[in-house]
Amino acid sequence: MTTRLAITGHRGLSAALEAEVDRMIRAAVAETGSVVGVSCLADGADAVFAQAVLDAGGALVAVLPASGYRDTLPEAYRPVYDALLARAAKVVQLEHVTPDPHAYMEAGKRMVDESDSLLAVWDGLPGRGPGGTADVVDYARSRGVPVTVLWPEGAVR
């Protein structure tokens, strides 16, 4: 049986923290077995997860919050985003034009609604703005979708 696994998580991780998160995500993906990964492909946890899913032989579903989403990503990250997007088995483009907190929350909800469980690379703190990791975790829990929180002990964003 294939498991549909979504990701939500922090962006702007330090290289050391991203390496530890990568190890944790790869372990979680490996435990899942046959997997379809659902991701917005943002820099940070989303991209680490997407690559781990592809490396494990899984399929990738990209949920894009808005048509202008790519332009809001860090310029140095865009080639990685483009490569991941090109490898997606399915792309879900939401109807928003401008990527804003509402669009991000709608994308988070869409990922949760289409998944069996959610991985959250989350420090457990309240969100820095609406539509972020904490809100997606709250939404998943409100829908009864299992959430696995991954965060290295003692790590600080």
Image (spheres, rainbow, N blue to C red):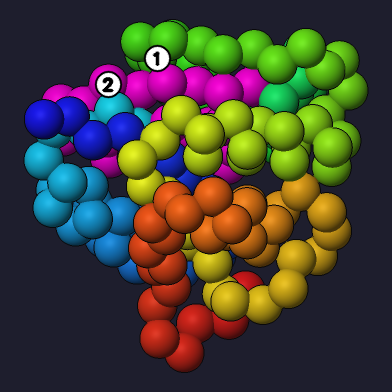
Regarding residue 3, the answer to whether it shows in the image is: yes
The disc labelled 1 sits on which kind of residue? Ala
x and y percentages locating residue 7 in the rendered image: 46, 45
* Residue 39 lies in the magenta-colored region: yes
Q: How many marks?
A: 2
Task: Look at mark 2 in the image and give the residue it sits on.
Answer: 59
The residue that appears at 88% across and 23% down in the rendered structure is 98
Nearest to N terminus: mark 1 or mark 2: 2
The residue that appears at 70% across and 16% down in the rendered structure is 94
Residue 48 against residue 147 in the figure, above or below: above
Q: Secondary structure at mark 2?
A: strand
Residue 56 against residue 143 in the figure, above or below: above
The disc labelled 2 sits on which kind of residue? Ala
Q: Secondary structure at mark 1?
A: loop
x and y percentages locating residue 102 in the rendered image: 84, 37
Q: Which residues are magenta?
A: 38-64
Regarding residue 11, the answer to whether it shows in the image is: no
Q: Is 126 in front, or is 80?
A: 126
x and y percentages locating residue 59 in the rendered image: 27, 21
Residue 89 against residue 3 in the figure, above or below: above
x and y percentages locating residue 52 in the rendered image: 28, 40
Is 36 positioned to the left or the right of 30 in the image? right
* Residue 53 lies in the magenta-colored region: yes
Is 62 positioned to the left or the right of 25 in the image? right
Is 71 positioned to the left or the right of 112 in the image? right
Q: Which of the 4 image quadrants contains residue 3? A: top left
Image quarter where the C terminus lies is: bottom right
Residue 88: assigned label: 1
The residue that appears at 17% across and 29% down in the rendered structure is 2
